[in-house]
Image: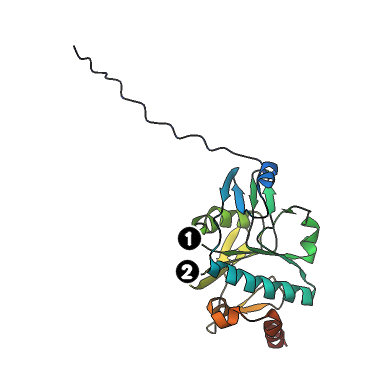
Amino acid sequence: MEVELLTPTAPPRTPAVKRITFEEYLDLLTEESKGDLIDGVLYMQTPPSDDHEQIFGFLFDILRNYVIHQKLGVVRGSRTTLKFSEKNGVQPDIVFISNTRRHQIHPYYVDGAPDVAIEILSPSTRKLDRGKKMALYAAHGVLELWQVDPEGETAEFFRNNNGVWTPMPVNEDGIFHSETISGFWLNVRWLFDEASLNKNSLDIIPLILARNN
């Protein structure tokens, strides 16, 4: 005789996500790897595209040399880790840290928010960069956030107003003026133009300085 079991089968349980501390996160990172720790969960990033790296190299070069020339602080690249708490640490693509926040720089991480964080979006990071990571930057005091989208060939800029991001304007000529990096402006079209991307910062910085005078 067959017996039918009336008790429904229990649904399979989703395995609990392993959560780690900031110290464990630092131990897992290498010079070749890049990732973010958000609410104790580690999100490793896939290797960047060539478009991503071209834009990164261009922005890093002109920003770093401009900031050095103007003696405004320091610019660091994509292996710089920011510590926001014991369960939150992130690695933006580029950060600007003013002289007033320079004391936050430690040998292996920056303790707290930089003045400016720059993210170059990719298909694998877009949701995180524009969601949880963006919220962390606002909550922990990043003053300005830049998001560059190589696929859509667009760039957006935001100002932090008491933990809420407010869009910053790009004028009709494609020019964005930073409110945080004194005197720095950027023609957004440069970011998606092959000829501009291949220019040396020594050619571009005089243009920026001349426009300010």
Residue count near mark 1 (Cα–Cα under 10 Å), binned few <14, some 14–19, many ≥20: few
Most foreground residue, 46 or 163: 46
**Quadrant housing residue 195:** bottom right
The residue depicted at 40 percent of the width and 31 percent of the height is 12
Task: Count the numbered circles shown.
Answer: 2
Element at label 1: loop
**Quadrant housing residue 53:** bottom right
- Is 86 displayed left or right of 50 in the figure? right
Q: Is residue 207 visible?
A: yes
> Which comes before the other along the chain, label 2 or label 1?
1
To which residue does mark 1 refer?
123
Q: CB atoms at circles 2 and 1 under 8 Å apart?
A: yes
- Is 176 displayed left or right of 213 in the figure? left
Q: Name the mark on residue 151.
A: 2
The residue depicted at 52 percent of the width and 59 percent of the height is 130
Most foreground residue, 6 or 60: 60
The residue depicted at 60 percent of the width and 51 percent of the height is 36
Q: CA distance from mark 2 to mark 1?
A: 9 Å
